[in-house]
Image: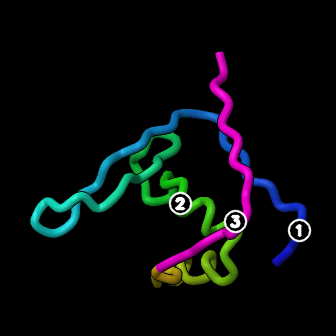
């Protein structure tokens, strides 16, 4: 994996609770921008930036891996005036 990549986002951020089958809690989705697109999901942006093969999979309409993990990261969120 290449070093020196950086993901930056400036704009709206939403955390949306999602439910699965039988209305069971399924987690939360973090959405950037207007939230009107699959590409607005921060998880997708992170995968595209850091998961090998994810960009090609998404471009071809395939799902990337079921589970993706970055073992040691720093995430900085700064609220702007």
Q: Of tags 3 and 1, which is closer to the observer?
A: 1
Which comes before the other along the chain, label 3 or label 2?
Answer: 2
Camera-side residue of 57 and 67:
67
Mark earlier in primary sequence (1, 2) = 1
State the quadrant of the C terminus: top right
Residue drawn at 62 percent across, 61 percent down: 46
Image point 61% across, 68% down: which residue? 47
Given residues 74 and 80, the one toward you in this image is 74
Task: Check the image and report above or below for 13 versus 41.
Answer: above
- Residue drawn at x 10%, y 66% as measured from the top left: 22
- Count residues near mark 3 (Cα–Cα under 10 Å), then give few for <14, some for 14-19, many for 20+: some
Residue 35 numbered tag = none
Residue 61 falls left or right of residue 72: left
Which residue does the numbered mark 2 point to in the structure image?
43
Q: Is residue 58 left or right of residue 6?
A: left
The single residue placed furthest to the left in the displayed view is 22
* Front residue of this view, candidates 6 and 26: 26
Residue plotted at (44% across, 39% down) = 14
Percent coordinates x, y for residue 6 in the rendering: 80, 55
Taking the view exactly as shown, the residue that stands out farthest to the top is 81
Q: Look at the numbered disc 1 and give the secondary structure of its residue.
A: loop
Q: Which residues are magenta?
A: 67-81
In the rendered picture of this protein, how many numbered marks are placed on residues? 3
Answer with mark 3 or mark 1, whichever residue precedes in sequence: 1
Residue under label 3:
49
The residue singled out by tag 1 in the image is 3
């Amino acid at each position: 994996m290449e070093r020196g990549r950086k993901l930056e986002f400036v704009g709206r951020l939403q955390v949306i609770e999602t439910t699965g089958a039988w209305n069971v809690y399924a987690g939360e989705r973090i959405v950037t921008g207007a939230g009107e697109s699959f590409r607005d999901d921060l998880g997708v942006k992170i995968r595209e930036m850091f998961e090998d093969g994810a960009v090609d999979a998404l471009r071809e309409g395939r799902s990337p891996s079921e589970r993706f993990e970055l073992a040691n990261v720093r995430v900085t969120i700064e609220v702007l005036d």
